[in-house]
Amino acid sequence: MVTDDPPRRGAPTIPLATTASLDDDVALLTELEPEAGRLYDRHLGVAQEWFPHDYIPYRLGRDFDKEPWTPDQPRLTGVAQVSFEIGLLTEDNLPSYHRLIHGMFGKGDGAWMNWVGRWTAEEGRHAIVLRDYLTVTRNLDPVALERARMTQLQQGYDHDAPSTLRGLAYVAFQELATRISHRNTGRYSQDPVADRIMIRIAADENLHMVFYRDILGAALKIQPSRAVQAIVDEVLAFEMPGAGIPGFLRKAATIAKAGIYDLRIHRDEVLMPILKHWRIFELTGLDPAAEEARRRLADHLDKLDRAAKRFEEKLALTGDGTRLARSG
Ligand SMILES: [Fe+2]
Ligand SMILES: [Fe+2]
């Protein structure tokens, strides 16, 4: 889309939290604070320092004023280009994610704020390294990319998470989804430079997932029924953070057909491993509402399985395009 017009937004969609739910959230964050501190320290112990410039083949760079970008320059296939574009525009929206995460955890104390700062700083590297790679290698039109970034950031991103528990559930699933889609984008690219970048970013996303998964694991011990309901609500409503990108549905379908991120991956490699880690279907002593939520979750997982099978059968019939082999 080529436009300088800022996107027009409707009324805010985030429901206002009630005082009662705000109090619940503050109490929960306070109770979880020692565990957040422990997980933050663990994160610092395993996270490796890395530098985006170490990953970029600057020797390939040429001035754009002397040699403008043309569509014959990219070495990546069209599908890989789409996947990199979605990946970068999603990472670009960091200011919105920071606002949301600060809104969720900013009511907590020390360790929560340390995490918010650290997480944001680490995420910032992802867009830097992706944009530098795509610009130096001329694998995407830098003008179209910058215009898309402008549109994306002016539109922003909101997530309908009325509670800390729902927010934590969302980010746990989302970090793992992003880890896998980045990793598979690198594999699909067949460019060793891109693959190395995506392995590096995916390792960050994995550590982010582990923090959120484990802090919600701790919350499940404190408020099991509320946490189960929040997890189920998030699984049922899950949407990738890039869903607001213009043409997202069409682009997501391309990425799914290529086997970079599809329903099968979403169910088997994102939802199931985290749900199993939390032992959601083994928890006892839940209240009736949480039991009912768990039944809805089981139905939903069955439905996803059937939809993934239908998608695979359809692909086998049409057999169009190159599909990435599953990582196993
Ligand atoms: Fe990221
Ligand atoms: Fe992340």
Image (cartoon, helix red, strand yellow):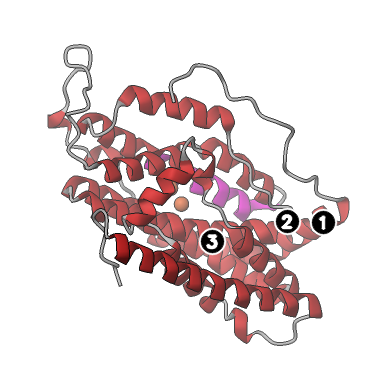
| Residue at the disc numbered 3 | 172
Amino acid type of the residue that numbered disc 1 sits on in the rendered structure: Ser
Please tell me whether residue 85 belongs to the stretch shown in magenta: no
Question: Is 119 part of what is drawn in magenta?
Answer: yes
Dot 3: few (<14), some (14–19), or many (≥20) neighbours within 10 Å? many
The range drawn in magenta is 108-126
- Ranked by sequence position, the earlier of labels 1 and 2 is 1
Indicate whether 221 appears above or below 121: below
Q: Which labelled disc corresponds to residue 21?
A: 1
Q: Is residue 204 left or right of residue 249?
A: left
Quick one: label 1, few (<14), some, or many (20+) residues within 10 Å?
Answer: some
- Element at label 2: loop
Relative placement, left or right, of 152 versus 105 is left
* Amino acid type for the residue under numbered disc 2: Ser
Residue 163 is labelled as 2
Query: Amino acid under label 3?
Result: Ala
Which residue is found at the position 17% from the left and 38% from the top?
75
Q: Which residue is situated farthest in the front direction here? A: 317
Calculate the distance from the C-alpha at mark 3 to the C-alpha at mark 1.
Answer: 21 Å
**Mark nearer the N terminus (3 vs 2):** 2
Label 3: which secondary element = helix
Q: Main secondary structure of the magenta part?
A: helix
The answer to whether the residues at label 3 and label 2 have Cβ atoms under 8 Å apart is no
